[in-house]
Image (cartoon, rainbow, N blue to C red):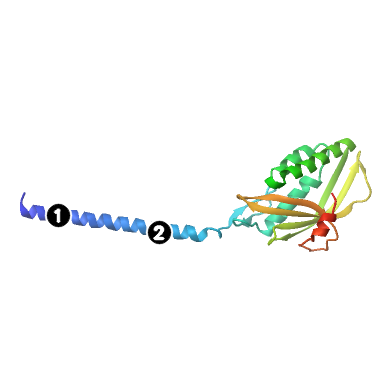
């Protein structure tokens, strides 16, 4: 092989190696930038989602949902739990239990099973019209106030009453879970926090 040809081949190889090195460096830098961006988004990303009853979009982070989403969920839960008849109680109970947190599933199922038996035995129905939903975004809870109407055999039982209910949620695993849904008493208009005594004294 001629010396000149050998030197030319070496120069070509060196240029090729430098080009490959530059490509590897650019790819490494791109991966590093992507990693930094991903790490910076952990814990701060907001995802736009919609509730079971699609009305408008809301944001959620890794452990919280916006108050608008919570209010929609609370209205949905109140409809499933309070607006029931012997014909609808079974499927509404099953729909509601899909949202209950694992730790509260047994207690909520027992309550709803008892309510289903009561409705069927008395041929009773209840109708709930929400009038105000006040969310506490920090504590992931909503106070739902509305008019509750009860019937037995199609006849009203007394006059419709204004009732308030506390819906407590937990956002984990990419979805909202129901922790508590119970009646509360002595709630003022616009009140977001409910004392333990007020919650414990309420009865469904």
Name of the residue lying farthest toward the left: 2
The x, y position of residue 193, in whole percent, is 76, 62
Q: How many marks?
A: 2
Image quadrant assignment for residue 56? bottom right
Q: Is residue 155 left or right of residue 109?
A: right
Q: Who's the residue at 74% across and 57% down the image?
A: 142
Image quadrant assignment for residue 166? bottom right
- Pick whichever, 174 or 190, lies toward us: 174
The x, y position of residue 164, in whole percent, is 82, 56
The x, y position of residue 9, in whole percent, is 14, 52
Q: Is residue 4 left or right of residue 81?
A: left
What is the number of the mark on residue 153? none
- Pick whichever, 178 or 18, lies toward us: 178
Q: Is residue 204 left or right of residue 36?
A: right
Q: Who's the residue at 73% across and 42% down the image?
A: 106
Element type where label 2 sits in the image:
helix
Tag 1 and tag 2, C-beta contact below 8 Å: no
Q: Residues within 10 Å of mark 1 (few under 14, many from 20)?
A: few
Q: Who's the residue at 82% across and 59% down the image?
A: 197
The x, y position of residue 46, in whole percent, is 58, 57
Element type where label 1 sits in the image:
helix
Q: Residues within 10 Å of mark 2 (few under 14, many from 20)?
A: few
What is the number of the mark on residue 32? 2
Residue 150 vertical position relative to residue 33 in the rendered view, above or below: above
Q: Which residue is mark 1?
A: 10
**Which comes before the other along the chain, label 1 or label 2?**
1
Distance in Å between CA atoms under marks 1 and 2: 33 Å
Q: Who's the residue at 56% across and 59% down the image?
A: 43
């Amino acid at each position: 092989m001629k010396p000149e040809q050998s030197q030319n081949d070496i120069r070509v190889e060196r240029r090729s190696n430098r080009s490959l090195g530059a490509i590897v460096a650019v790819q490494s830098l791109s991966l590093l930038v992507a990693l930094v961006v991903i790490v910076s988004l952990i814990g701060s990303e907001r995802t736009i989602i919609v509730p079971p009853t699609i009305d408008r979009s809301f944001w959620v982070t890794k452990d919280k949902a916006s108050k608008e989403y919570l209010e929609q969920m609370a209205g949905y839960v109140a409809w499933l739990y309070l607006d029931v008849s012997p014909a609808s109680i079974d499927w509404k109970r099953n729909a509601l239990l899909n949202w209950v947190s694992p730790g509260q599933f047994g207690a909520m199922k027992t309550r709803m099973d008892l309510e289903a038996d009561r409705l069927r035995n008395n041929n009773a129905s209840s109708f709930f019209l929400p009038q105000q939903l006040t969310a506490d975004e920090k504590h992931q809870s909503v106070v739902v106030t509305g008019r509750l109407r009860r019937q037995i055999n199609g006849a009203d039982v007394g006059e419709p009453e204004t009732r308030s209910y506390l819906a407590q949620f937990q956002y984990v695993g990419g979805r909202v879970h129901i922790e508590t849904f119970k009646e509360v008493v002595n709630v003022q208009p616009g009140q977001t926090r409910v004392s333990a005594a007020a919650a414990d004294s309420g009865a469904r």
